[in-house]
Amino acid sequence: MIDRPIIVTCGDPAGIGSEVVQKAWNELRGAVPMCMIGDPHFLPLDLPYVVIDDPAEAKHHCATALPILNHPFRDALELGHPNLSNARDVVQVLERGVQLVQQGLGHALCTAPIAKSVLQKGADFKHPGHTEFLAHLDQKTNVVMMLASPDLRVVPTTIHIPLEQVPNALTSELLETTIRITHHSLSTQFGIAEPRMAITGLNPHAGEDGRVGTEDNAIIRPVIEKLQAEGMLLTGPHPADTLFHARARAKYDAAIAMYHDQALIPIKTLDFDGGVNVTLGLSFVRTSPDHGTAFDIAGQNIANPSSMIAALKLAAQMGQR
């Protein structure tokens, strides 16, 4: 068992974050020590909890009650209806969670879903998403978003930008940095001695040697060849439509895709409920369930906690390595 709790942020309290955290705690019951930062008045389920003052107290309670580090939210809550007045508290919970893991008081950080539009309107949130905000708090210039499940690990090189901006954003420097960070994390945090990575092309059929786009040969292939010469086990650029069937997946430990949907569609098709969002390149381990706030089902006690459970288990494993 890990010696420090995983710090869990509550996410938007009007969504399903607290529900899936409570359900995950109930399933794990101390097998993965955790404590959640949030307002206990907003807990939607009638399950035991205990308010604690210090993360170190969590291990003494986690088998019998969900430990809560109290963060009172300033306004009322109606599940399914986000309140802009609470947006700043959502941000402060994230800031507090990062501080705790940076100080060594938490084993890892696991974040429940936020609603970016709510934070942008209610808290003047300037970041495209969780990943970029955590990088800002950790003072990291380069971080990588990985989606992980038992069947697939995949990394998008460009993340939360419009599709029309991808060709200009996809540079040799960005791709090389993404591959290097992923390679390092596979080795140090996933325990893979010699990581194998498959790299997608950008265009259909990986450009067909320039007939369907030039980026594959001009940008992607030279980076692969450079890193292969250094000893990395890379293949590609591969046509993305041939890279995610079972026989192809058996040949690599992670796939590097060129843009958001190219990466997320295959993993959400393979394991919609169990995928985990992992931020690579931070000074601490951060995982998150691979779903959103689901305001439409909040308060109905029907949210599936599988992704949160997987995120907590993966955080525990990665932190131990």
Image (cartoon, rainbow, N blue to C red):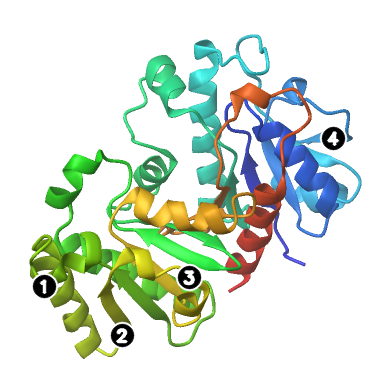
The part of the image, by quadrant, that contains residue 81 is: top right
Residue 300 position (above or below residue 201):
above
Q: In this orientation, which residue lies closer to the viewer: 152 or 145?
A: 152
Residue 127 position in % (x across, y down): 33, 34
Q: For mark 1, what is the residue?
A: 209
Q: How crowded is mark 1: few (under 14 residues within 10 Å), some or many (20 or more)?
A: few
Q: For mark 4, what is the residue?
A: 49
Element assignment for label 4: strand
Residue 1 relative to residue 273: left or right: right
Q: For mark 2, what is the residue?
A: 232
What amino acid is labelled 3 in the image? Answer: His
Task: Compare marks 1 and 3 and give the one earlier in the sequence.
Answer: 1
Task: Look at the image and tell me in which quarter the N terminus lies.
Answer: bottom right
Disc 4 or disc 2, which is closer to the eye?
Answer: 2
Q: Can residue 284 be seen in this view?
A: no
Disc 1 or disc 4, which is closer to the eye?
Answer: 1
Is the residue under label 2 in contact with that under label 3 (CB below 8 Å)?
no
Q: For mark 3, what is the residue?
A: 245
Q: Distance between the residues labelled 1 and 3?
A: 23 Å
Q: How crowded is mark 3: few (under 14 residues within 10 Å), some or many (20 or more)?
A: few
Is the residue under label 4 in contact with that under label 1 (CB below 8 Å)?
no
Task: Compare marks 4 and 2 and give the one earlier in the sequence.
Answer: 4
Task: Compare marks 3 and 2 and give the one earlier in the sequence.
Answer: 2
What amino acid is labelled 4 in the image? Answer: Tyr
